[in-house]
Image: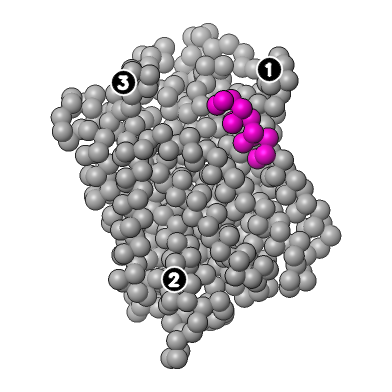
Amino acid sequence: MTGLPSSDRKYRRSPPRSPLLPQKLDDDQSFDAHGSGFDGASTSGAVFNLSTTIVGAGIMGLPAAVNQLGLIPGLLTIMFVSMLTESSIDMILRFSRASKSKTYSGVAADAFGGAGSNILQACIVINNLGMLVVYMIIIGDVLSGTSVDGFHHGGVIEEWFGQHWWTTRSALLLFTTFFVFAPLISFKRVDSLRYTSALSVALAVVFVAITAGVVIVKLMEGKIGMPRLMPKLVNQASFWKLFTTVPVVVTAYICHHNILPIENELKDPTQMKSIVRKSLTLCTSVYIATSFFGVVLFGDHTMDDVLANFDGDLGIPYSSLLDDLVRVSYGLHLMLVFPIVFFSLRLNVDGLLFPYAIPIAFDNKRFFSVTIALMGFILMGASFVPSIWDAFQFTGATAAVCVGFIFPAAITLRNIPGIAAKNDRLISWMMIFLAVSTSTVAVTSDIYSIF
């Protein structure tokens, strides 16, 4: 299947001729929608695409979150959220099959009507748009550097080639947009990104390997102390601050918006549950390793974005080279994550703006118009409003929690197809309670810390 509608076909007005996409995904359905010879995505490609959707910028915030919680509770929290994520994804898959819906927004529409579908799509747009602007900001910081409190932290391109017009933030982001993003976001099938997704996951593993190597060398030299295993509670404020770490862990697992687009392109859709489990196992392993080695290496000096810790002397030979390797590999990793998050952003923006049109993949004019408009907005946000990160800490956290846990739980509790078991209801109520309570405390704590 070449393209997927941004809202379910049963909620679109069908043209008088035969629909371009079938109402249901039958077992014998051909994927060769454009005569391109595409006979379905492979399991390995789907694993890499889903893993890349999960492992984005969130990986860099996890060491600080685990350090705040303490090493043992922090790692247990990562594993717990991974299990909750698997449950919420399983709910989406089961209810999509029961309602014959091919998109997440279609499942929401089946449960709550058009209003529910629109609210979910708005949450996905807010979450993905925020993520992509932040990705752009980080890429700009890595390549051209950033200034904080009057002190300039140099970027790798600026350090290597000096200050020129073409090493400025705006120029480098423009080059990245035209020569990296533009080709990758022009694909109409998510499966077309499987090779870049595999490379993206490999680059995340490179970061883990370098961090682990530095820890091992410093352990052999006796330069690393014992990390803090439990949280440090000195007053009531420090206790409430622990809850601000939960949205960081939760947002690190948000991939729900790409679950059904990936499943719809599979040669064998029955493999999706296994693909989800493999992806979550891979990503959880990367998250645990990153958090463990990051906390052991930097301890209480772990920054909110651990990448900032790789901006100085690591206390071992070739420290400067390792710093550059970490920053370059992570910058490239985000460049390759960008198009797969953009894929679902474009589908959901199109679903909000053109709910009754034919699927965007079959309308080249609309496809490229929406693509150019979104890229222009993201580029302007990253180039001229770098402080937008603070705003998206609130919108991203709340929208991500809705996309990842509140909507799957609410759809299960609504139970229109009548397939939810008692255990599903218990898990759904637990998801909603944890999502609402932790997000409320986290947002309140963030507002309190600002003012």
Sequence-wise, which precedes: disc 1 or disc 2? 1
Q: Residues within 10 Å of mark 2 (few under 14, many from 20)?
A: some
Quadrant containing the C terminus is top right
Q: Are marks 1 and 2 in contact (CB under 8 Å)?
A: no
Of tags 1 and 2, the one toward the viewer is 2
| Three-letter code for the amino acid on which mark 1 is drawn | Lys
Q: CA distance from mark 1 to mark 2?
A: 51 Å
At numbered mark 2, what does the secondary structure look like: helix, strand or loop?
loop
Residue where numbered disc 2 is placed: 354
Q: What is the CA distance from the residue labelled 2 to the residue labelled 3?
A: 44 Å
Q: Is residue 20 visible?
A: yes
The residue lying furthest to the top in this view is: 222
Circle nearer the N terminus (2, 3): 3
Q: Which residue is mark 3?
A: 152
| Dominant secondary structure (helix, strand or loop) of the stretch shown in magenta | helix
Q: Which residues make up the magenta segment? A: 439-451
Crowdedness near tag 1: few (<14), some (14–19) or many (≥20) residues, C-alpha within 10 Å? some
Q: Nearer the viewer, mark 2 or mark 3?
A: 2
Give the image location of residue 137, x and y in percent. 37, 37
User: Which residue position is annotated with label 1?
Assistant: 232
Q: Is residue 48 visible?
A: no
**Residue at position x 48%, y 35% in the image:** 390
Placement of 274 over or under 325, stated as above or below: below
